Image (cartoon, rainbow, N blue to C red):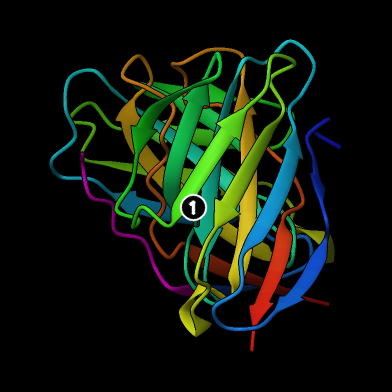
Amino acid sequence: LAKTTQPISMDSYEGQEVNITCSHNNIATNDYITWYQQFPSQGPRFIIQGYKTKVTNEVASLFIPADRKSSTLSLPRVSLSDTAVYYCLVGDSQAGTALIFGKGTTLSVSS
Amino acid sequence: ETGVTQSPTHLIKTRGQQVTLRCSSQSGHNTVSWYQQALGQGPQFIFQYYREEENGRGNFPPRFSGLQFPNYSSELNVNALELDDSALYLCASTPGRVGTEAFFGQGTRLTVV
């Protein structure tokens, strides 16, 4: 399983764009990159998943360069309610559903 | 709301006791996974059940066991509780054995004293 490295914490202000970068140097050919969001005392929530280039949904965008050794989760115009822990996961979506979480990035949004 | 419900939401047990946690999976999902999340850490995979059979296990001792029922709901049992078992226990369901988009419940906060 590819190991991921992401910043422990980030601070932002309301209305700003936040970019959280995740490194996964040993990503395998069949691996997808998935991001989850977790609020205190709640279970993680799936945000976005991608394999290469760019993926966008109503919540976030995911940018993946050609070498796929890193990825960036982009949250446009964050609000206080985006304060949460964000996890970057890398794994083969066809190999099973066991998710391997690291410590994640704690994003704090202030007014 | 993910449609995955867990009970109870909070629980206090004494060291050495046994505990059973319950999870109802999202409608149409036949696979349930359990995770343990210690304070300040990411969730750690305990095991997974697919159509009532264990289908993968993380690095947890045998005193962590589980069941999945015909309606795909699930139980997590922990025997001989230790203080380090204090954690948030999360249940996640998926529509099949594969896929990385899981739907988590709100968790059960277990405190062992």
The residue that mark 1 highlights is: A87
Q: Quadrant of the C terminus of chain A?
A: bottom right
Q: Is residue A6 left or right of residue B35?
A: left
Tell me residue A48's x, y (percent).
57, 31
Residue positioned 54% across, 78% down in the render: B16
Compared with B16, A48 (above or below) is above
Which residue is at a point 50% across and 26% down the rendered structure image? B49
Q: Is B74 in front, or is B30?
A: B74
* Residue A17 seen anywhere in this rendered image of the structure: no
Choose between A7 and B1: the one closer to the eye.
Answer: B1
Do we see residue A1 in this rendering? yes
Q: Where does residue B96 sit, x and y in percent of width and height?
A: 53, 12
Label 1 element class: strand
**Considering the image in quadrants, where does the N terminus of chain A appear?**
top left
Magenta part of the protein: which range?
Answer: A1-9
Give the residue furthest to the left: A26
The amino acid beneath tag 1 is Tyr
In this picture, is A20 found above or below B76? below
Determine if the magenta segment contains residue A3. Answer: yes
Q: Is residue B13 left or right of residue B34?
A: right
* B60 lies above or below B47: below
Q: Relative to A61, is A82 on the left or the right?
A: right
Label 1 packing within 10 angstroms: few (<14), some (14-19), many (20+)? many
Q: Quadrant of residue A30?
A: top left
The quadrant in which residue A50 appears is top left
Residue A75 place in picture, x, y as percent: 64, 48
Name the image quarter holding residue B113.
bottom right
Residue drawn at x 54%, y 59% as measured from the top left: B78
